Amino acid sequence: EIAKKMNCSIDRVKLAIEKMRKLDTSPGLLVSKVQNPPIMPDLIVEPDGQGGYEVHLADASMPSLRLNGYYLKMARDRHLDDETRRFLQNNIRSAQWFMEAIEQRKNTMLRVARSIVKHQKEFFDKGQLYLKPLPMSVVAADVGVHVATVSRAVAGKYIQSPQGLLPLRSLFGGGTETPQGDSQSFD
């Protein structure tokens, strides 16, 4: 039947099928084997049931970092030689500094996200058409940090919200409000 519609012989159709079986079904993989890992949100925005939104870190269920009690006790042991004790104490201080830096980074990201949600409430309520121009300088002033800190805090971060999974950076945009109160983008 197919051979008649294609105006060729059955043998020619079989030969074509045999050649097609040998073709690479993913020829792009020869050029690049880049994989696209799934995007995981860093922050989650949920309605709070009172007309507002609650923002929390997506990794809130992950255990926090802590120091091993054995090494803490060992660093205080007066029977241990001084060099070993100094080594332990220096590394414990470094670990504590590292853990505090991570906590500070999380706290900054959370404060920045809460400020964004506060300024973009209409967007979270009603959708894309209600996304206002929001310069990073406004969020920086609200949070009490430098604009560069806000930029670093949102770089490569994603937020899960009622409007879907979004890059946190997409909730910004240069612009201003007109004297009538309308948003005007610099685009």
Image: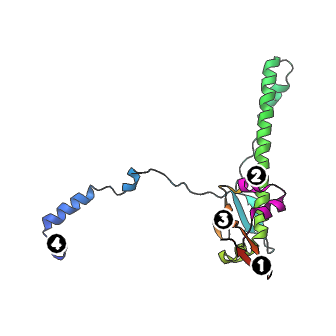
What SS does tag 3 mark?
Answer: helix
**What kind of residue is marked 4?**
Ala
Residue at 72% across, 56% down = 151
Q: What residue is disc 3 on?
A: 170
Q: How many marks?
A: 4
**What kind of residue is marked 3?**
Ser
Name the disc covering residue 106, or none. 2
Q: What residue is disc 4 on?
A: 3
CA gap, disc 3 and disc 1: 22 Å
Q: What residue is disc 1 on?
A: 178
Q: Please identify the quarter of the rendering in which residue 40 is found.
A: bottom right
User: Dot 4 surroundings within 10 Å: few (below 14), some, or many (20 or more)?
Assistant: few
Percent across and percent down for residue 46 are 73, 67
Residue at 29% across, 56% down = 23
Q: Earlier in the sequence, mark 1 or mark 4?
A: 4
Please indicate whether residue 103 sits to the left or right of residue 9 in the image.
right
**What kind of residue is marked 2?**
Lys
Percent across and percent down for residue 121 are 76, 72
Q: Is residue 147 magenta?
A: yes
CA gap, disc 2 and disc 4: 66 Å
Which mark lies nearer to you, 4 or 3?
Answer: 3
Camera-side residue: 118 or 78?
118
CA gap, disc 2 and disc 3: 19 Å
What SS does tag 1 mark?
Answer: loop
